[in-house]
């Protein structure tokens, strides 16, 4: 059985690496201060930002997969996730930084709800943020400012200040991810091409008759990426979320089948919908008209001989 380190609070990881606690809900660790450290496979009950040192290169587990953790990248984890490398008794020298914070520090703040919008917490390790040297220095500067704040005596303003720094870190991470999506346009276009090809083959092989309309989860698994990363890439290229892109693809097929003479119920079942009513509602929501109205309009637009 795997040895798993439960990190229910920042102090659990502090104890593992040998750092003193400075706050019950947040911790900043400079690995150069605590190395060498033992490997650990972590079950997170906290949020974490791991900024890997530029020299490190290792294979880490994330969820049920094993991924290459490139040097200098930023990985973000959320409560309920599993990641790291199983403890084999080996001590390794690491550089880089770690920020861990418990969800309770966000209570009563705007970030308590907004943090759900940062989809990179659900990215896999092979989708980590690759920063420029300038971007990396900005992140390290913020890690240091949080660490410096934690050295002051606690007062009524401290948690607000700490949450402000966390918020700023996450905003910068989102900005840098947006830059990464743009700078990797050829790679992202390849993802979109593979996504479209997957959808075409799905319906050509009539998998929808057994499994229903394809989901983002299904497509992301076939493309070997997380659902949130696929959605973000597709949205960056097309302006649409992956789920909406799938629905638009299905509607294009539906229009072709309606024009060919199939009625609404036949089209619904042929595309994997459980109920014709569901298909009709989806069709109207995306096109502004019902399948019947669409067919009637197309007939009226046909030139008379």
Image (spheres, grey):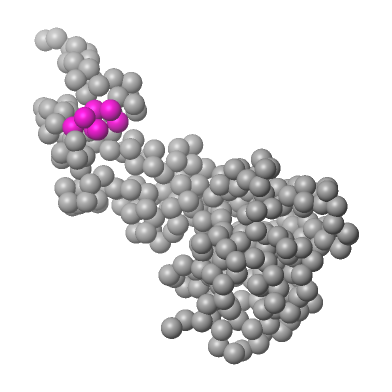
Residue at the spot x=44%, y=70% of the render?
65
| Viewport quadrant of the N terminus | bottom left
Residue at the spot x=57%, y=76% of the render?
5
Residue 73 spot, x, y in % from top left = 64, 65
Which of 55 and 24 lies nearest the eye of the viewer? 24
Q: Which contiguous range is marked in magenta? A: 276-282
Judged from this view, the residue extending furthest toward the right is: 152
**Residue 160 in view, yes or no:** yes
Question: In this image, 7 relative to 210: left or right?
Answer: right
Which of 36 and 261 lies nearest the eye of the viewer? 36
Question: In this image, 162 relative to 199: left or right?
Answer: right
| Viewport quadrant of the C terminus | top left
Most common SS among magenta residues: helix
Question: In this image, 305 relative to 125: left or right?
Answer: left
Residue 60 spot, x, y in % from top left = 54, 74
**Residue 271 in view, yes or no:** no
Residue 275 spot, x, y in % from top left = 19, 36
Question: In this image, 74 relative to 280: left or right?
Answer: right
């Amino acid at each position: 059985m795997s040895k798993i380190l439960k990190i229910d609070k920042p102090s659990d990881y502090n104890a593992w690496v040998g750092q003193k606690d400075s706050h019950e809900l947040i911790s900043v660790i400079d690995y150069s201060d605590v190395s060498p450290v033992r490997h650990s496979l972590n079950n997170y009950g906290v949020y974490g930002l791991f900024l890997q040192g530029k020299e490190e290169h290792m294979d880490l587990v994330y969820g049920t997969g094993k991924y290459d953790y490139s040097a200098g990248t930023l990985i973000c984890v959320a409560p309920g996730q599993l990641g790291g490398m199983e403890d084999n008794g080996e001590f390794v020298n690491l550089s880089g930084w770690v920020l861990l914070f418990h969800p309770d520090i966000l209570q009563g703040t705007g970030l308590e709800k907004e943090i759900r919008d940062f989809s990179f917490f659900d990215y896999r390790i092979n989708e980590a943020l690759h920063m420029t040297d300038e971007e990396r220095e900005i992140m390290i500067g913020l890690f240091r400012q949080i660490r410096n704040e934690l050295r002051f005596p606690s007062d009524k303003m401290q948690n607000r200040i700490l949450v402000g720094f966390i918020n700023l870190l996450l905003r910068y991470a989102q900005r840098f991810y947006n830059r990464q999506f743009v700078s990797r346009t050829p790679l992202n276009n390849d993802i979109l091409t593979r996504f479209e090809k997957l959808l075409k083959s799905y319906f050509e092989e009539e998998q929808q008759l057994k499994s229903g309309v394809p989901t983002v989860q299904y497509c992301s698994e076939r493309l070997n990426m997380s659902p949130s990363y696929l959605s973000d890439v597709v949205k960056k290229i097309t302006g649409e979320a992956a789920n909406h892109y799938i629905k638009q693809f299905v509607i294009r097929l539906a229009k072709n089948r309606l024009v060919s003479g199939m009625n609404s119920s036949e089209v619904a079942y042929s595309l994997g919908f459980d109920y014709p009513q569901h298909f009709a509602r989806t069709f109207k929501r995306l096109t502004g008209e019902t399948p019947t109205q669409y067919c009637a309009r197309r007939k009226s637009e046909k030139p008379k001989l």
